[in-house]
Image (spheres, rainbow, N blue to C red):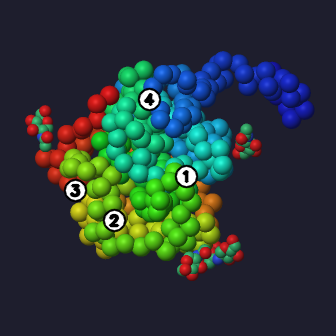
Amino acid sequence: MRLSLNTPSSLWATLASLPLLHAASLQKVTADFYNPTNVGFYLYVPDTLAPNPPVLVTPHWCHGDALAVYNGSSFASLADAHGFIVIYPDSPNPADQCWDVSSPATLSHQPRAGTGGDSLGIVNMVAWTVKRYHADAGRVFVTGVSSGAMMTEVLLAAYPDVFAAGTAFAGVAFGCFAAPDGSADYWNSDCAGGLVTHSGAEWRAIVQAAYPGYSGWRPKVQVFHGTVDEVLNYTNLAQEVKEWSAVLGLCGTPSSVVENTPYPNWTKYVYGKDDWLEAYSAANVTHNIGNHEDVVMAWFDLACTTGECFRWGQGGPLGSSLRNSTAAF
Ligand SMILES: *[C@@H]1O[C@H](CO)[C@@H](O)[C@H](O)[C@H]1NC(C)=O
Ligand SMILES: *[C@@H]1O[C@H](CO)[C@@H](O)[C@H](O)[C@H]1NC(C)=O
Ligand SMILES: *[C@@H]1O[C@H](CO)[C@@H](O)[C@H](O)[C@H]1NC(C)=O
Ligand SMILES: *[C@@H]1O[C@H](CO)[C@@H](O)[C@H](O)[C@H]1NC(C)=O
Ligand SMILES: *[C@@H]1O[C@H](CO)[C@@H](O)[C@H](O)[C@H]1NC(C)=O
């Protein structure tokens, strides 16, 4: 049958619901797992999974939710194409739907059934997904925009044993949003305004305090920021670079600068020689910077299904003696 623009919308709806066109859908998981703040768990499992599939976690922005990222990004159709699983966590904070990136509970590594915050709930979703779908615990990745970017950096700092890489679009350094009184869901306007600045050594100490004694392998990091970001001041990009370069033991001066990458007027800065930290300055871009699925697909090697796909413990500046995972799924 030939469909025209005049085709009744009820027919379009029928066609869209036919299993062959798109059988997989976003599902809400209500499994019994330890979830101290009751983060909502939405999962997309494509009909055809890659063997031992990778897992992509994509926390939403403030005033967003899991459905907004599912609908507003192409990660689900990319999962259809490449066979990976997508976790869309949903913030339990009714006030503004921001992630808790301010309380000591969320800003620290916790045992799987310990105290903990939004970050532990997300980590336990990853653990549940790895078990349920025989997913690859070495290929777990996280990316988000704004509050989702802040949560991305929280997960990389507090659970470096779980995540192999992360990409943060318009976020802030780990710990920058910490509440002076330790409260959860705190909006740190000093950090947002670009007024929280530290030396690399200070930022490194903040990250190390998230998981005291951890000396293992660390995920690789990409950070992006628009120069005219009106919500989280552009100054935060430099703080993120100071933090992650210090944590990874890299020189804070870029080893390469590439203009007009990946888009016109965006500049790519690479730190160190292992390509473990990349920062992107997006000229004239506001807080509304976007998801950039193409960028994270490449950084996480998510299209890879056979052979030497990028994974936890592979490469990096910290050396092979530090590569043992402590994650126990
Ligand atoms: C889904 O996204 C489109 C634009 O990308 C928007 O017009 C629509 O309202 C969204 N629907 C939901 C349910 O979020
Ligand atoms: C970011 O902060 C700087 C320094 O306070 C300020 O000059 C600039 O206008 C701020 N940027 C935006 C987009 O608000
Ligand atoms: C890049 O910047 C130049 C001027 O600085 C501007 O004219 C041009 O429109 C910008 N291109 C894009 C794609 O933003
Ligand atoms: C920056 O963006 C504003 C509005 O979005 C536009 O008017 C201006 O030409 C842009 N400037 C450059 C250098 O791209
Ligand atoms: C890593 O694991 C191997 C084999 O399980 C062990 O021999 C080695 O001591 C461990 N290395 C570290 C740094 O824990």
Of the residues shown, which amino acid type is indicated by label 2? Answer: Trp
Task: In the rendered view, tell whether residue 80 sits above or below residue 279.
Answer: above
Which is more foreground, mark 3 or mark 4? 4
Name the secondary structure under disc 2: helix
Residue to which mark 2 is pinned: 203
Residue 89: in sight, yes or no? yes
Instruction: Give the image location of residue 170, x and y in percent.
Output: 53, 61
**First-in-chain label (3 vs 2):** 2
Question: In the rendering, at what x and y percent does residue 43 appear?
Answer: 54, 30
Looking at marks 1 and 4 on the same chain, the residue that comes earlier in the sequence is marked by 4
Compared across the picture, whether 320 is left or right of 277 comes to left
Image quadrant, ligand 3: bottom right
Residue extending furthest toward the front? 181
Q: Is residue 251 left or right of residue 300?
A: left
Closer to viewer: mark 4 or mark 2: 4
Q: Mark 1 sits on what residue?
A: 185
The residue to which callout 4 is attached is 34
Taking 227 as reference, is 81 above or below it?
above
Residue drawn at x 24%, y 43% is 313
Q: In front here: 11 or 245?
A: 245
Q: CA distance from mark 3 to mark 4?
A: 34 Å
Q: Earlier in the sequence, mark 4 or mark 2?
A: 4
Mark 4: give few (<14), some (14-19) or many (20+) Cα within 10 Å: some
Tag 3's secondary structure? loop
Q: Is residue 165 left or right of residue 23?
A: left
Q: Residues within 10 Å of mark 1 (few under 14, many from 20)?
A: many
Figure quadrant of residue 189 = bottom right
Tag 1 and tag 4, C-beta contact below 8 Å? no
Disc 1 to disc 2, C-alpha distance: 21 Å
Identified at 46% across, 63% down, the residue is 180
Closer to the chain start, of discs 3 and 4, is 4
